[in-house]
Image (spheres, helix red, strand yellow):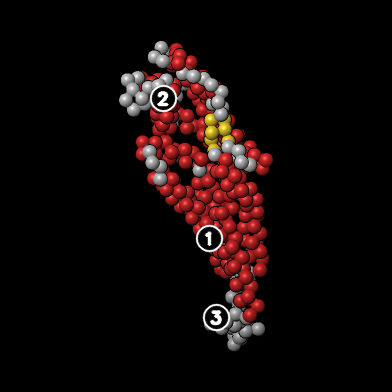
Amino acid sequence: MRPRPPHLPLPRGPRVRNALSAALIALACLLVPFGTLAAWAAYGLADTGRYVAAMAPLASDPDVRGAVADTVGDDILAEVGADPARGTFKPFVHEAVRSFTGTETYRTAWDATNRTVHGAVLRALRDDRAAGRAVTVDLAPVTARVKARLAADHMPFAHRIPVEHTAVAVLPADEVDRLRKGYHVLDVAAFWLPLGAVVFALAGIAVAACRRRAVTATGLGTALGGALLALAVALGRRLTVAGLPDELHRPAAGAVYDALTTTLRTASWLLVTLGLAVAAASWLTGRHGRRRLPRQPSPGAVRP
C-alpha cells in the first residue's frame, strides 16, 4: 500500500477524532486550575487543623506582630477611656502589647484564637440551621492573658481592663448566608472538577488518532493551567493588599495572604513541572521511536 502524500487531507474519521480529542483535552486543561483552586479552598482553608498550622508561623512575623500590637493596644486604651490617638500611655501600652507578642503565651493564644474563630465560622457555614444568625466567638481568655501580662509589668490602668465573656461578632448574618451557599458549591466542585479534568483528559487521549500528540498536548495544557493559576495567585495578592484602606497594615495582610496560599502556589508550580515533564517525555519518546523505525524500500527498488 502506497503511503498517502502529506499534503492530502486526513480522512473524515481521523479528522473527527482529532477534533473531539482536542475539545476534550482543552476542557480538561481548563478545569485543571479551577479544580486545584476549589480543592485548595475545600480541603485546605476549610480544614481547621491545616488552617491553624498555616497561620501559626505568623505569630512570629514582625509585620503581623506590629498590626496586632496596634489593634489590641488601641482597643485597650479605648476600654479604659483613653484616646488611642493622643493618649499619654499609648506608647507604653503598645510597647507592652508588642512585647507580649514575643512570648510563648501569645503564641498559644494566637493558635487558640485562630482555632476558635475558624471553627465557629466553619460550623456556621456547614449548618443550614444557623441561617440568619451571625458568627460570634468569646475572646475573653485572650484578653485575660494580656491583662495579666500588663499587670505583671506594672502598667497603669492594667487592672481596669475588663475581662467579660461577651460574644464578639466575626461575620454578620447576611454575609454568613451568602458564604454558606458558596461553601456548598465549593464542597461539590472540589471533588468533581479535578475528577472531571482527569476523565476528560483520558477520554481525549483515548479517542485521538495520534495518542502521543494528545499526551503532549495534555501535558502542555496542564502546564499552562498551572502557570495561569500561579499568575492569578500573584495578582490576587496585589489586589487584596492594595485594596486595604490601612496602608500601615498592608505588609501584615500580605504575610497572611502568603501563608494561606502557600499550598496553592506549590500546587500550581507542581502542575507546571508535571505538565512539562509529561510533554517532554512524550515528545522525546516519539522522536526516539521514529529513529528506530526501519526504512521502507521504495516501490521501484529492485531487491537483490
Task: Using the image as rendered, state which of residue 149 and residue 237 is in the foreground.
Answer: 149
Q: Which residue in the protein does label 1 denote?
A: 220
Task: Using the image as rendered, state which of residue 280 and residue 10 is in the foreground.
Answer: 10
On screen, residue 109 above or below 207: above
| Three-letter amino acid code at the position of disc 3 | Pro
Task: Using the image as rendered, state which of residue 235 and residue 179 is in the foreground.
Answer: 179
Position of 97 with respect to 132 (left or right) is: left
On screen, residue 132 above or below 21: above
Q: Which label lies toward us, 3 or 2?
A: 2
Q: Which residue in the protein does label 3 denote?
A: 6
On screen, residue 157 above or below 230: above
Q: Which residue: 48% across, 15% down?
A: 148
Disc 1 to disc 3, C-alpha distance: 25 Å
Quadrant of the drawing holding the N terminus: bottom right
Q: Which residue in the protein does label 2 denote?
A: 78
Farthest-out residue, bottom: 300
| Three-letter amino acid code at the position of disc 2 | Ala
For disc 2, the neighbor class at 10 Å (few under 14, some 14 to 19, many from 20) is some
Which quadrant would residue 254 be assigned to in this image? top left
Q: Which residue: 59% across, 63% down?
A: 27
Q: Which residue: 59% across, 44% down?
A: 177
Residue 70 location in percent, x, y?
39, 28
On screen, residue 210 above or below 7: above
Q: Tag 2 or tag 1, which sits nearer the N-term?
A: 2
Position of 267 with respect to 63 (left or right) is: right
Disc 1 to disc 2, C-alpha distance: 57 Å
Which quadrant would residue 17 be assigned to in this image? bottom right
Secondary element at image label 3: loop
Residue 268 location in percent, x, y?
52, 50
